[in-house]
Image: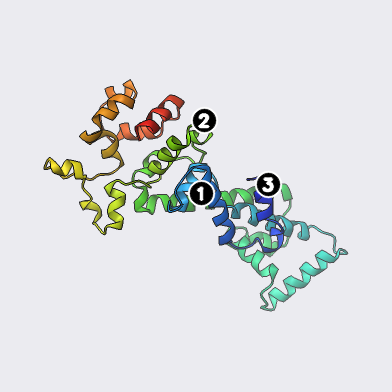
Amino acid sequence: FDAIVQPILVYASEIWGYEHSDIIERTHIRFCKRVACLNKNVANFFALSECGRHHLKVTYMSRCVKYWTKLVTMSHTRYPRQCYLMLRRLDDSGRNTWATQVKRLLFQCGFGYAWIADTIGNVHLFMNMFTSRLRDMSQQALWTDINSSSKSLSYKHYKSVLTPETYLSMPLPFPLKRALSNFRCSSHSLMIEKGRYLNIEQGLRFCPFCQKSGIQTLENEIHFMLFCPLYDALRQRHFKTSWLLSPVCEQLFVNIMSDTRKDSIFALARFI
């Protein structure tokens, strides 16, 4: 994707890359969903998080600002430099130009001082700082989505670092990979998710099997994984011995979901 698709998506972004592009971000997210074998209705932040990806705006906005640094350091005898100075004068007079958009981007990212001074010093150092700031902003937006969404109540406990998940690069059969990825990203038929479409209050999305025994307990990922008696035989068959011997609690669920060992991933995927 980075070698073939991305260069096409961000082509000429030196000119237009000063603002967020929905269509380009959607293309990137669709690709991530296909890589992770996720369903189309999965929330977009899950796809980026599972693949350990930043928004593509990090790339096209950096390219736009890098072109601006080139204009700033260019000789006054060059036509691009003269055009840039003309755009700055139009911006000073209240006109909305490319220079206006670059100025807005710099101020949004905390680099307004560079625009005011119209100088940047070391270009390489400046661009490293600017790109790093964009990555931080992208990652912060991603964590905000994860922590604020009702779909990621379990996910946020076992996903804390923005890196590609190990199972994506494993020779995991497609049915197992799809089952694992969609379970991780809350695209399943448990009542905690299914009840959303049945207009059932979150606190009343009880496990149908346990209800038959007079037990009213929320059917979420933790209940399915560790507690529901319906799946006891499957646990005995597919769980690792260390999991079966560990105390059954929420921390065990987090440990299983965040385990990056290949045998653990295969065991978890087969169980799901």
Check contact, mark 1 vs mark 2: CB within 8 A: no
Q: Secondary structure at mark 3?
A: loop
Q: Nearer the viewer, residue 156 or 12?
A: 12
The Cα atoms of the two marked residues, 3 and 1, are separated by 24 Å
Q: Residue furthest right?
A: 77
> Residue 235 vs residue 85: left or right?
left
- Residue 14 versus residue 90 in the image, above or below: above
Q: Name the kind of residue labelled 3 in the image.
A: Ile
Q: Nearer the viewer, mark 1 or mark 2?
A: 2
> Which residue corresponds to mark 2?
171
Residue at image position (38%, 42%) is: 183
- The quarter of the image holding the N terminus is top right
Q: Nearer the viewer, residue 69 or 166?
A: 166
Q: Nearer the viewer, mark 3 or mark 2?
A: 2
Residue at image position (65%, 49%) is: 5
Quarter-of-image position of residue 9 = bottom right
- Residue 1 versus residue 165 in the image, above or below: below
Q: Which badge, 3 or 1, is on the more N-terminal residue?
A: 3
Q: Name the kind of residue labelled 1 in the image.
A: Gln
> Residue 218 vs residue 103: left or right?
left
Q: Name the kind of residue labelled 2 in the image.
A: Pro
| Label 2 Cα neighbours within 10 Å, binned few <14 / some 14-19 / many ≥20 | few
> Which residue corresponds to mark 1?
139
Q: Residue 235: image x %, image y %?
A: 29, 28
Please say which color scheme the image uses: rainbow
- Residue 266 versus residue 218 in the image, above or below: above
Q: Secondary structure at mark 1?
A: helix
* Residue 170: image tag: none
> Residue 52 vs residue 270: left or right?
right
> Which residue corresponds to mark 3?
4
Q: Residue 38: image x %, image y %?
A: 46, 46
